[in-house]
Image: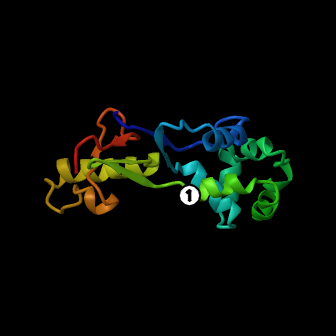
Amino acid sequence: AESVRIIHLGDYVDRGPESAGVIASLINDRPADAETVFLKGNHEDFMLDAIDGGGKGLTWLMNGGEQTLESYGIDAGPLFDSPERIGEIIRGRLPAAHLGFLRGLKTKHAVGGVYFAIITQALALAMWYIFLRNETMLGGTNGLTDFKTLLGFPLQPNVDHPEAAINTKRA
Protein backbone atom coordinates (compact mmCIF):
# COMPACT_ATOMS: atom_id res chain seq x y z
CA ALA A 1 0.00 0.00 0.00
CA GLU A 2 1.19 3.48 -0.86
CA SER A 3 1.86 5.70 2.14
CA VAL A 4 0.00 8.97 2.48
CA ARG A 5 1.71 12.11 3.73
CA ILE A 6 -0.18 15.33 4.45
CA ILE A 7 1.91 18.48 4.76
CA HIS A 8 0.12 21.41 6.37
CA LEU A 9 1.48 24.80 5.35
CA GLY A 10 1.38 27.06 8.39
CA ASP A 11 -0.59 30.17 9.32
CA TYR A 12 -3.10 28.15 11.33
CA VAL A 13 -3.72 31.16 13.58
CA ASP A 14 -4.68 34.78 12.87
CA ARG A 15 -6.96 33.87 9.95
CA GLY A 16 -10.35 34.39 11.56
CA PRO A 17 -12.24 33.86 14.78
CA GLU A 18 -11.62 30.10 15.08
CA SER A 19 -7.85 29.82 15.59
CA ALA A 20 -8.28 27.80 18.78
CA GLY A 21 -10.63 25.43 16.95
CA VAL A 22 -8.22 25.09 14.02
CA ILE A 23 -5.37 24.13 16.36
CA ALA A 24 -7.62 21.68 18.23
CA SER A 25 -8.67 20.10 14.93
CA LEU A 26 -5.10 19.77 13.69
CA ILE A 27 -4.15 18.05 16.96
CA ASN A 28 -7.18 15.79 17.31
CA ASP A 29 -8.41 15.04 13.78
CA ARG A 30 -5.33 13.54 12.16
CA PRO A 31 -6.03 10.65 9.79
CA ALA A 32 -4.81 7.40 11.32
CA ASP A 33 -3.54 6.12 7.96
CA ALA A 34 -1.44 9.15 7.01
CA GLU A 35 1.77 10.78 8.14
CA THR A 36 1.11 14.42 9.02
CA VAL A 37 3.69 17.19 8.91
CA PHE A 38 2.97 20.67 10.24
CA LEU A 39 5.07 23.59 9.05
CA LYS A 40 5.30 26.84 10.99
CA GLY A 41 4.03 29.98 9.28
CA ASN A 42 5.08 33.48 10.19
CA HIS A 43 1.88 33.98 12.21
CA GLU A 44 2.71 31.06 14.51
CA ASP A 45 6.20 32.54 14.80
CA PHE A 46 4.68 35.92 15.81
CA MET A 47 2.39 34.20 18.31
CA LEU A 48 5.21 32.24 19.94
CA ASP A 49 7.37 35.35 20.07
CA ALA A 50 4.53 37.20 21.84
CA ILE A 51 4.05 34.30 24.26
CA ASP A 52 7.77 34.28 25.04
CA GLY A 53 7.97 38.07 25.43
CA GLY A 54 10.24 38.54 22.43
CA GLY A 55 8.97 41.98 21.48
CA LYS A 56 6.65 41.22 18.54
CA GLY A 57 3.47 41.25 20.64
CA LEU A 58 2.01 44.45 19.21
CA THR A 59 2.85 43.38 15.66
CA TRP A 60 1.10 40.08 16.30
CA LEU A 61 -1.99 41.78 17.76
CA MET A 62 -2.28 44.05 14.72
CA ASN A 63 -1.93 41.13 12.28
CA GLY A 64 -4.62 38.77 13.51
CA GLY A 65 -3.43 38.08 17.04
CA GLU A 66 -6.41 39.90 18.48
CA GLN A 67 -8.83 37.41 16.87
CA THR A 68 -6.63 34.50 17.90
CA LEU A 69 -6.65 35.63 21.54
CA GLU A 70 -10.42 36.10 21.41
CA SER A 71 -10.78 32.53 20.11
CA TYR A 72 -9.20 31.47 23.43
CA GLY A 73 -11.61 33.67 25.39
CA ILE A 74 -9.09 36.45 26.01
CA ASP A 75 -10.10 40.10 25.62
CA ALA A 76 -7.21 41.46 23.59
CA GLY A 77 -8.28 45.11 23.79
CA PRO A 78 -6.29 46.04 26.92
CA LEU A 79 -3.18 44.29 25.56
CA PHE A 80 -2.71 46.90 22.82
CA ASP A 81 -1.48 49.23 25.57
CA SER A 82 0.68 46.57 27.23
CA PRO A 83 1.65 43.92 24.66
CA GLU A 84 4.45 42.71 26.95
CA ARG A 85 1.72 41.09 29.08
CA ILE A 86 0.51 38.80 26.27
CA GLY A 87 2.77 35.96 27.36
CA GLU A 88 1.65 35.85 30.96
CA ILE A 89 -2.01 36.13 30.02
CA ILE A 90 -2.10 33.60 27.17
CA ARG A 91 0.07 31.03 29.00
CA GLY A 92 -2.67 30.80 31.60
CA ARG A 93 -5.41 30.24 29.00
CA LEU A 94 -3.75 28.32 26.18
CA PRO A 95 -4.17 24.55 26.55
CA ALA A 96 -0.82 22.82 27.08
CA ALA A 97 -1.47 20.64 24.01
CA HIS A 98 -1.88 23.77 21.86
CA LEU A 99 1.36 25.32 23.12
CA GLY A 100 3.15 22.01 22.59
CA PHE A 101 1.76 21.81 19.06
CA LEU A 102 2.95 25.35 18.26
CA ARG A 103 6.40 24.71 19.71
CA GLY A 104 6.68 21.47 17.72
CA LEU A 105 6.05 23.03 14.32
CA LYS A 106 8.77 22.49 11.75
CA THR A 107 10.34 25.23 9.64
CA LYS A 108 11.09 22.92 6.72
CA HIS A 109 10.54 19.31 5.71
CA ALA A 110 12.07 17.08 3.04
CA VAL A 111 10.29 14.31 1.16
CA GLY A 112 12.47 12.30 -1.19
CA GLY A 113 14.82 15.22 -1.78
CA VAL A 114 12.02 17.75 -2.26
CA TYR A 115 11.95 20.45 0.42
CA PHE A 116 8.90 22.23 1.75
CA ALA A 117 9.20 25.46 3.70
CA ILE A 118 7.19 28.52 4.57
CA ILE A 119 8.87 31.62 3.24
CA THR A 120 7.53 34.95 4.38
CA GLN A 121 6.54 37.41 1.67
CA ALA A 122 9.22 39.87 2.74
CA LEU A 123 12.00 37.27 2.55
CA ALA A 124 10.79 35.94 -0.79
CA LEU A 125 10.55 39.44 -2.22
CA ALA A 126 14.02 40.35 -0.92
CA MET A 127 15.42 37.17 -2.43
CA TRP A 128 13.78 37.94 -5.75
CA TYR A 129 15.28 41.45 -5.78
CA ILE A 130 18.71 40.02 -5.01
CA PHE A 131 18.27 37.50 -7.82
CA LEU A 132 16.97 40.14 -10.27
CA ARG A 133 19.72 42.62 -9.41
CA ASN A 134 22.46 40.05 -9.78
CA GLU A 135 21.15 38.53 -12.98
CA THR A 136 20.21 41.71 -14.83
CA MET A 137 22.39 44.47 -13.40
CA LEU A 138 25.52 42.68 -12.25
CA GLY A 139 25.58 39.77 -14.65
CA GLY A 140 25.26 37.28 -11.81
CA THR A 141 28.90 37.71 -10.90
CA ASN A 142 28.80 37.97 -7.10
CA GLY A 143 27.25 34.59 -6.31
CA LEU A 144 24.18 35.89 -4.49
CA THR A 145 21.91 34.06 -6.91
CA ASP A 146 22.73 30.81 -5.14
CA PHE A 147 19.69 30.69 -2.89
CA LYS A 148 21.13 27.60 -1.24
CA THR A 149 23.43 29.88 0.73
CA LEU A 150 20.43 31.85 2.02
CA LEU A 151 18.01 29.09 2.97
CA GLY A 152 19.93 25.86 3.13
CA PHE A 153 18.27 24.37 0.06
CA PRO A 154 17.67 25.34 -3.58
CA LEU A 155 14.82 27.74 -4.16
CA GLN A 156 13.41 29.08 -7.41
CA PRO A 157 11.71 32.52 -7.35
CA ASN A 158 8.34 32.77 -9.04
CA VAL A 159 8.64 35.53 -11.65
CA ASP A 160 4.91 36.29 -11.78
CA HIS A 161 4.44 36.33 -7.99
CA PRO A 162 7.65 37.29 -6.18
CA GLU A 163 5.94 36.77 -2.82
CA ALA A 164 5.62 33.07 -3.65
CA ALA A 165 8.90 31.21 -3.94
CA ILE A 166 8.86 27.43 -4.17
CA ASN A 167 11.25 24.60 -4.80
CA THR A 168 9.84 21.84 -6.96
CA LYS A 169 13.16 20.30 -7.95
CA ARG A 170 14.85 17.39 -6.26
CA ALA A 171 17.81 18.45 -4.15
> Which quadrant would residue 2 be assigned to in this image?
top left
Q: Is mark 1 on a helix, strand or loop?
A: loop
Q: Nearer the viewer, residue 60 or 116?
A: 116
Locate residue 93: give its quadrant. bottom right
Q: Picture coordinates of residue 144 (x, y %)? A: 23, 60
Q: Which residue is found at the position 57% from the left and 55% from the top?
A: 45
Amino acid at pointer 1: Gly
User: Visible in this render: residue 58?
Assistant: no
Residue 129 visible from this viewpoint: yes
Seen from the viewer's position, the closer of residues 145 and 39 is 39
Q: Residue at x 56, y 43 (%)?
A: 11
The relative height of residue 17 versus residue 76 in the rendered view (above or below) is above
Q: How many marks?
A: 1
Q: Which colour scheme is used?
A: rainbow
Is 15 on the left or on the right of 79, as rendered? left
Residue 151 point in image, percent of width and height: 34, 58
**Residue 90's spot in the image, x, y percent?**
78, 57
Q: How would you rate the neighbour count of disc 1 (Cα within 10 Å): few for under 14, some for 14-19, many for 20 or more?
A: few
Residue at the far front in the pictured view: 1
Residue at the location (17% across, 55% down)? 138
Q: In this view, does 101 lie to the left or right of 96?
A: left
Q: Residue at x 45, y 45 (%)?
A: 121
Quadrant showing the N terminus: top left
Residue 72: x, y in percent?
A: 79, 45
Which residue is tagged 1? 104
Is residue 140 depicted above or below 23 in this figure?
below
